[in-house]
Image (cartoon, rainbow, N blue to C red):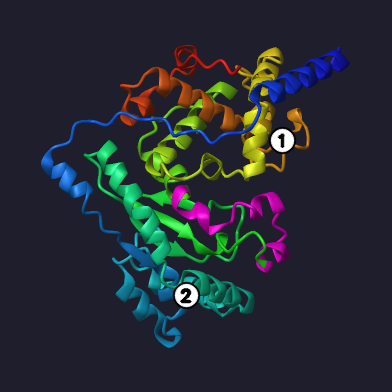
Amino acid sequence: MRNNIVKIFCILLILCIVTTGCWKKKKPVDVAKPALTEEQLKTAESVEINLLRYEQDLFNIDQANMAAEFAKMYGKYPDNIIAKGAWNNPEMLQFIRDFINDPVIQEIYKESETQYGVMSDFKKEITPALTLYLTHFPDETIPDFCTLVTGIDFQMPQVFGYKNTIFICLDMYLGKDCKFYGQAGMPKYIAARCDKKYMATDCFSKALVYKHLPEKTLVTLLDNMVDAGKKMLFTQTMFPSTDPQDILGYSKEQYKWALSHESAIWHRMIEKNLVYDNSDDVVRRMMDEAPFTRDFGNDSPGRIGVFIGFQIVQSYMKNHPGTTLKDLMKMTDSQKFLKESGYKPA
């Protein structure tokens, strides 16, 4: 039985390669926008970035007067960074002192400062994206941004949101060949995502998007795929000139493979009853970071469920051109969404 399934999958792969032909870059889906008042349009066109550089303040602090220095910084940074009165805790101060005096941490900070001392490229890339964001969500305010150096903890997010601030761990964007990643034991497939080209888009797909997703427990693989697809489309809409593989965090080769085998992947998911499967194992296999998705072989990219989710959401938006991002984010019935998406890869 297993041999028959493998044969069927291989035949589907061959058919996909024959019928797909040369890979072509897809044009981003056009997403409807709400009507804007003149004031809202003016606000969107006059975006100014508030970028806080916590790591610069931290590593240049007067260590002889740390308590007083932190007291001065209180209010400048969110309370998850500097809580009121935290500078009166001797253990906390010693912990910070040990951290910023660690030779390896100092090297990491210096490399982060070399690459991101000014961050003009980030501002240049994020500003038009925030302008587009305000045209889709005119009642929102743009977030503040705060940079950190955390000592290369690849178990924590590269970016994360707290209240109205997006935090960026600069030492997680030092380039895939950064020596510190190898020293920390970071897998190469994780290091591949530690590139500066992902920083701006990550701020949207891994932080800002959560302001607009409804609270819902994701149960089935389909729930997770549609949720991930929304995040990808949300981000692609704000970065229309960015290649879709960069939105997904794929290499060109990985994205080409996924497109070429899309139909075979989807048919395999259907045949194996994976789409509505609610087991943690299936969801992890299809959605989590990995060097490949083992159900589809070593040549496949990881997180293939994210790719399929992106395709489903794009199909829905193409078939419902009047749908705004706000409307899209509110949808919670993934089974109904799939049916109405008209998603049927050839």
SS under mark 2: helix
> Disc 2 marks which residue?
93
Q: Residue at the far bottom: name it.
A: 64
Name the side, left or right, on which 261 lies relative to 170. right
Q: Residue at x 74, y 23 (%)?
A: 13
Q: Is residue 127 magenta?
A: no
Q: Which mark is residue 300?
A: 1
At a point 52% along the width and 39% down the height, the residue shown is 244
Residue 81 visible at all: no
Circle nearer the N terminus (1, 2): 2
Q: Is residue 180 magenta?
A: yes
Residue 65 visible in rendering = yes
User: Which residues are the magenta region?
Assistant: 179-201
Q: Are marks 1 and 2 in contact (CB under 8 Å)?
A: no
7 to 75, vertically: above or below: above
Residue 320 appears at what percent x and percent y?
Answer: 37, 18
Residue in the picture at 58% in, 64% down: 174
